[in-house]
Amino acid sequence: MNTPQPELLSHLNLETGRLTWAEAQRHFARGVVLKVAPELDLVEVAAAMAADDKAAFVRWLEAGLVARASTEDALRWHEAQAEFWAVVVAPWVLVQEIGQEQ
């Protein structure tokens, strides 16, 4: 991964917040939720996306570490009333489930 600019990381860190499943549902319905595996740093993934670091994203996608949220994810999140750390890199909403096993 290319080293993200410190200013970008700082900005995205400030834009990161908690999101409940009830709040995330509308974004899921629009098809713009990307789930980020717990072993990745959410802000670094968002920075790579903002910087258009395609090589990093291809690696993460192929490894299953970043993926578009599925209907199965949504059903599980609804049942668990999941909470997330989330950050927007328009048009995408990147989420990382809080309390998910690493």
Image (tube, rainbow, N blue to C red):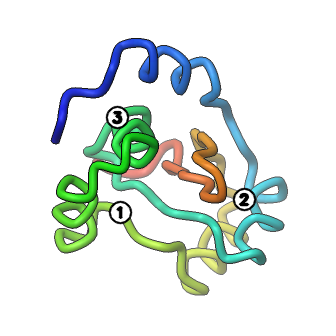
Say how many tags the image has.
3
Mark positioned earlier in the residue sequence (1 or 3): 3
Q: Is residue 100 above or below residue 3?
A: below
Classify mark 1: residues with Cα within 10 Å, few (<14), some (14-19) or many (20+): many
Q: Amino acid at mark 2?
A: Gln
Q: Amino acid at mark 1?
A: Val
SS assignment at label 2: loop
Classify mark 3: residues with Cα within 10 Å, few (<14), some (14-19) or many (20+): some
CB atoms at circles 1 and 2 under 8 Å apart? no
- Rendered image: mark on residue 102: none
Mark positioned earlier in the residue sequence (1 or 2): 1
Tag 2 residue: 81
SS assignment at label 1: strand
The residue located at (27%, 69%) in the rendering is 61
Using the numbered discs, state the Cα–Cα distance from disc 1 to disc 2 in whole angstroms: 21 Å
Q: Is residue 26 left or right of residue 58?
A: right
Q: Is residue 94 above or below residue 1?
A: below
The residue located at (19%, 74%) in the rendering is 62
Mark positioned earlier in the residue sequence (3 or 2): 3
**Residue 95 place in picture, x, y as percent:** 55, 51
Tag 1 residue: 66
Quadrant of image for the N terminus: top left
**Residue 23 place in picture, x, y as percent:** 82, 53
Q: Quadrant of residue 21?
A: bottom right
Tag 3 residue: 44
SS assignment at label 3: helix
Q: Is residue 25 left or right of residue 33?
A: right
Residue placed farthest to the front in the image? 52
Q: Nearer the viewer, residue 52 or 31?
A: 52
